[in-house]
Image: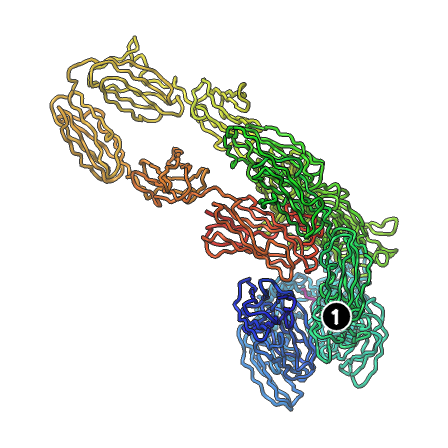
Amino acid sequence: MDRAGVQLVGDHVKHISVGKVAVAELSAVGFQRDDVDINILSPAKVPVSYRLLEEDGLFRIEFTPLDVGSYIMDVYVNGQKIQDSPIFFKAYDSGLIHVSDVGSGIVGQPCQFRVDASQAGEGQLEISINDGEVPNHVQVLGGGKCLVHFTPESPKPHTIDIRFNGEAVPECPFVCKVSDTSQVTVELQHLELMPVGEAAMFHIQVDTTDNAELAVSVQGPRTDLPVKVSGNVKHGFTAEFLPEEVGPYTICVEYNGIPVGGTPFIGKAFDSSNVLVSHVPWGTIGKSLQFTVDASKAGEGNLEITISARGRNIPTQVHPQGSARFAVSFVPLEAIDHVINITFNKEPVPGAPFTAKIHTDPNHIVVSGQSLAATAVGKTSFFTLSNVSGNLEDIEVAIDSPLGEEVSATVKDLGSGSFKAEFSPKIAGEHQIYISFRDEQVPGSPFACKVYDVTAIKVRECVKGIVGKPVTFLVETSHAGPGNLEVTVNNGQVPTSAQAQGNHTYAISFNPKEAKPHIVELKFNGESVPGSPFKCLVVDAAKVNLSGEGLEKVPVNKQTSFMISGQGDMGDPEVKILSPMKDVVTSSIRCVGEGQYEVDYSPESVGDHQVEVKMAGLHVQGSPFIVKAYDASQVYVTDIQPGSVGKPVYFSIDASQAGAGNLEIIVSVNGRNVPNYVQSEGNAKFKVNFKPQENSPHYLSVKFNNEPVPNSPFECRIIDSRQLVVSGAGVKMCPVAQPAKVNITSTAGNCKDCLIKVHSPGGEILSLSTIVNDWNQASYEYVPLEVGAHHVHVVMDGQPVVGSPFTCNVYDVARVIVTGLEGSHSMGSPVTFTVDASQAGEGTLELVVTTGKSSVRAEVAARSRGLYEVTFVPQEAIPHFVNITFNDEGIPNNPFQCMVIARKTSVQKSPKKAETSTIVARGDGLKQAVYNSKTVFDIDTTGAESAPVVRITDPYSFNVSSFLTETRPGLYRAEFTPTKLGTHTVSVTVDGRPIPDSPFKTEVFDPASVKITDVGAAVIGAECSLTVDVSAAGHGALSVAVRTAGQEVKHSIRDLSRGQYQVLYYPELATTHKVDIKYNGLSVPDSPVVLNAKNPVTGREPTATGLGLYQARVEKQTSFIIETLGNSAQAFDIFVTGPSEVVPPNEAIPVRCYQQKDKNLLVEFKPLSAGAHKIEVLHNREHVSGSPFVCQVFDPNRVIIIGAEDRNATVGEPVQFQLERKQAGFAELNVVAVSPLGQDLPIDVKGVPSGDGDLIEFTPGVVGRYKLELTYGLEPIPGSPLIYIVQEDRSPTVFGKGLTLGQVRDVCLFKIDGRGMQGEPRVEVTGRCRTVLQEDKDEAGLYIVKYIPEEVGHTGIHIFWNEVEIPGSPFQARICDAAAVLPISGWANLLDKEGRMDMVVGEEKLITWDVSKAGPGSMDIEIQGPKYDHRLDNAGPGRIKFVFIPRKEGTFTLNTKWNGVPVRTMQVVVRGGKPTGRVVLTGKGLVSAICGEESVFVIDGSEGGEGEPEVKLSGIDSTINVSCRRVGQNVWEASYTPARPGTYLLNVTWAGRLVKECPLKVVVEPPSNASRVVCSGDGLRAGTLGKEIKCYIDTRSAGQDELTIKCEGPHGKKALSELNDHRDGRFTLYIRPQEVGRHSLSIQYGGNHVPGSPFHLRVSAAPDPGKVRVYGPGVEHGVLARYQSRFICDTRGAGAGQLTVRIRGPKGAFRVEMQRESQKDRTILCKYEPTEPGDYRIEVRWSGEHVPGSPFVVMIFDTEEELNRFLQGGYSPAGPQISHTDFYGSIGHHYSPYGNIGFPAGTMSWRGSQANIP
């Protein structure tokens, strides 16, 4: 049956609550339940169970979602997906919405709370307060979170109702208690300072009779205090508490849980009894007297100190010492008691008043008087002289002014020895008074008199103030002379503070707490200054309330108003309203009552208006207010087009010019609302869509701030295009040049309303012939003239009908070409011919081979799109016929005849089967090549006897000449130069057999053919573009990077079809932009394109331009230009601030400005540290456009290269290093790599996991020198360029005795085998020696090294290849001198004249050798003779002891060697003799033993006469029992078994006499302990066949013993083992297994297994990427909305290896995940969840090699139409083998992210982990 009748009932997208049943209904009349199949995937892509119910052709599908997210339902009928599939279910959970911070509120003040819906899923959030009576404003914070504001206007509980998709959220509704605290007043100003120990009280007045809760609390410095509250509502309440300690007290009064105005209030408690005054010493007239006052423990307050004598105040100096300590000094001028009065906050301190005693001397003249210390200008001043025993002529008085002028003075005799001096100073300043009696100065002379002028003091009064804000006025005393300035406010009740401003100017401040006039008194040296006292009117701005619509959002050109309510004594308010352009807006003020004013104004422009309100000349609280003016008439609704039932209808709303406000959109039909969805496009522009379900007009109501926008509501006509059916060959498939018919039928009778257009592949519109044009039926014809997809557009009322545009594939059978069937062919031999249908269009090609009697089997292989290769093997020598049809039409010359003849028989020898499985071809030339450029690749035949054969064909099957060069034995380099674009086939064979992966497909492209056109201007904030044409460049990947000032610029790429691409970018900075365009990683002509972005406001207002605004280099002068437009330079301010993360932070950078000839300003500055600098450019104190700018300052010298120490690499192996630029600032990083062939290499730059650097990676393809140039901000970084030497994956081998041993003054030799390798060796031998390196004349690459050492010791031999030290280097050679080995006694005393030594049987010969100058080594003595005993022991540093005892007569030969080099050969002649009385001891037990093991030695007394031995073996604290048994005539065997390690002494006596050489030292060592042997390394667990396995064995803690190794495979095959002894108790074990499977490795020490032994090794076959299978929808093309990104990687049979999945696509548009059922599962599920359309490249590698089909190129489209166009032959710039990453979004080198998975790795990791799969 036809599935077209199957359709979904209801919406494609449904919202459903988690835990509730989700339902979808399907109308499928005529189908059975078994015909319907459902597939539902959860958000985690896990299948979901469901129920399927059926009733009369209506199917009901039910399931229960358990998780939040999108559920995708696919519906299949008879195995085919229906048209409406997939269906999306958006599951949400309103229970996961969290509401927080719902507190209490105050009338008239904003309240806010938070709503977190980030975990609840998709849906509509509705918030209403008091059933919508109170407006609220929602501020979106991102991530599903928002902040909600509202302002309560009445004191009542506010109910907050929050619903999500119509469901109430948990704990809803919420209640916010709102109170009006303005009804409660508290008087607390008098408690600013309060004494300790006295009750503190304050009054609370409540102006309401409502039931309310009043709470009073006081928190002291350490704890809460009890508060006593008394009173009632009528008369008010009194609160009382007792401060008990010094410190701050926080007073809080809450009304209904909300603090009232003025609270919390902090009062300060003080204790004047804690003020300490030091002892006041006796004083002397004219000398300063000093004492100290300590108020550090008294709290805060005012300290007043006055000193008086005879009722007059004495000038006093107070010097702060810190921590509330002061030094007080004054100069007494009279010999009387001075009274010192000290108060703290008007309370006397303990001991006050104090008395200062002044010394008097009856025998001296006493000078006294206030004028001696200070007096005023112009005032007649005097002082007296008492106790004078002389007359007037004996007294002389001289007074000098500050200018050195003399001031006249008159002296009068008062009698009784007293005199009075009078003077009148003219200027202020310090005067010197000289008094002498009979030409001698009196005590204290000269006196310093400070003359002041109180009239010269100037006070800049401050006549107005605000409660709670400091009031400051200036006092200038520069011409007043010295003195004390006293300032009191309200008789000292208000504290004051003074701050010096320089030049004798002081800023006096006080902080008023009450709204009343404050009286300010100023005295200078006790005299009132002019104008004192003056009055400052203080008002309470908090009591000025502003309300009304005129302070919120207001419409333009409409009058609005607001109210000002304040105190009556404040005066009239001042109101000033400024527009967004700072123009004054006309306003009027009317007094509507006492202290009540109404302000009217009408804003004329959209934007933020500034409302300044002043009372008594001062801003009220909150002034200036920001009022947002809007204009609903500036909201434009556009693009309203007729819609179709079931299809989204879109329209646009532009509110960018309307100001701030709320936009309300309602779509309705027949009185019912239709859901609509709003998408912000930025800058207050929106895209709105809704999906109509009824064939009726829909009305769109749009309001802005509750005002209808112009022409609202709008009408949108809706049609049901599903009533139209379009059919015919003209919308499906038809041949070229033949009429194609299009039929339209309608059940609604509207066929005549249809408009039809047919577009050819070239975009031309074809003419149509009308056959029938009726209301219910219409028929048309057109004639296609070219092959390709024709698009048929059917439109009704401006909307495309369902399925439009339709695609008709036009084909031409005449363009199917068959070649290769000409001539005759042999029976039994394959016949291969090609069928080229690439130019024939889309269609089905069918082919049959017959003989006339039967059909012949043929194999068809697709070589490229539309090109096929057909092969069949004829078995009869008769004509064969090939019948080919295309779209069921026979092609020209069909059928084709193939002549087959009998084959001649001949005998040939079977060629030897060559092994080609190990032959490898590698290089970029096997993947892609550049047109008309030399291309290379390498072939490693690994020892094959024959050279490879290379055959290259172009896309047209023509051969391409190639050249083959053997670069070393078994390694060949192939070169060719392609001259055609397209896919080239590279076939490589050895001995007639193709090598693995042959034939290769090489894509040839031409970056030089890429053209850049239509380069538009770059403007800030606008969409800018240019066009790239790659149609003539071949298949490839286009990549685009747009940068400016070291920053990436947002951009995208749009496919225009037919190889045309439009690059869109969006400049944000007025700087030079570089558009770098590459094709397959290579730069194209004219790239980079350099464009200067312009600021659109340039020329209309002052602007700043230049690179220096955005990027600069450390310690380098940078600059930018300010275009002043003729404004004066003084109108501009420039501030440059350094970064905050350096020391010092936010440092101000010096700036220089120069005015240019064009009146513009050149600004220069030099940054000193890397980081973001802020540049502020202000014009008339307003930021210019773009200010503040952020300038990224960089320092290329702070970029550090990490991990690039080793500059040697191997072909095919990635080269990696890191860049650390954390301290270098931000700039553009550019890395360019040049290969040995002079070609640029693609470089991969990625971020490291820590985020503090970059990972640089490239893979060399050929041997040679690679150069990497690294720049940062276009400047080279330290260490650049990097030079890498790349060679084959093998190192030269070295061998020869000279690597380990050598003899002084003798030639030492070894060889270096580098045959077949590029490069040359270098050898360094340490120590004094001569070295010669030469290449073997007969063997190229074989080098002989000779050196002659001149000194003994250990010599290091360093061997380098291409300046890289080879593995194992340096080698250590032991250099010795055998000629330096000499007997201590000399040869003359040891041998006779004939060079022989005579001995008798049983005689012991001791020879001590001096080897101190022989170098490192060991002695070896070879003895040939009948029978003997001997010992070779260490005799101390540089000496060796040799004992020789012949047991039979005869001739003995002693051949002495040192390190294997002969020293001397001695002849020993032994004759028989009589007993010598000597007892000989022999055996290992004389020297050493092991705990727990028996040790023996022999006592031979055959020459010692009769007797028996006695043996004693003793240590420091123990004795070992030794047993002896007779084994011969006077020959005994002694044995002992030690129990404790240590050093023991062995004493042997024979017949009561101690044997010579005794006592002997015996060292007992602990037994070996196999459990202390440590084995490590990966070789103990797993390995790969054909590769060496390595592990390490450490026996240093296990004692001395024998180490044995045994390794066997599962079938008994022994693995090859090699043990390398490091001579220090450590060993390296090398194992080379001979078969696959589980191996057993036995490691024993002293016959015991070490821990873990036997080890079980899993030896796996070598990885085989060809066995990995990748399949699933995730590697196929699709549509984004229903795309399933999962795919399977099946690694069964691929051997051990590592799976790496790497996906490249639009940045941030996907996330890679990999999972498997268990650790042993070799089938991996991968998915990447794309979120944007574009090209995705999926690379799947097994152990670093691509698996079959990789890389996969997946195209994901926005719509089904785009997908169909692509699948039906639309142009694609990338073939299946070419990376297509950088289309759709210009990815550059960004790979994001990686997905790696390993087996069996234990813990799964989604990023970065890798493990081996066995």
* On-image quarter of the N terminus: bottom right
Q: Nearer the viewer, residue 1362 or 1414?
A: 1362
| Residue 702 rendering spot, x and y as whole percentages | 76, 74
Magenta span: predominant SS is loop
What amino acid is found at the position of numbered circle 1 in the picture?
Ser
Q: Quadrant of residue 316?
A: bottom right
| Residue 569 rendering spot, x and y as whole percentages | 78, 82
Q: Is residue 1453 left or right of residue 975?
A: left
Would residue 1183 be seen by someone viewing this image from the given angle?
yes
Q: Is residue 495 left or right of residue 1446?
A: right
| Residue 886 rendering spot, x and y as whole percentages | 68, 50
Q: Is residue 992 left or right of residue 466?
A: left
Question: Is 795 situated above or below 575?
Answer: above
Residue extent of the magenta highlight? 313-317
In the picture of the structure, the residue carrying the numbered disc 1 is 746
Would residue 273 be seen by someone viewing this image from the given angle?
no
Q: Residue at x 16, y 34 (%)?
A: 1523
Question: Is 1058 situated above or below 773?
Answer: above
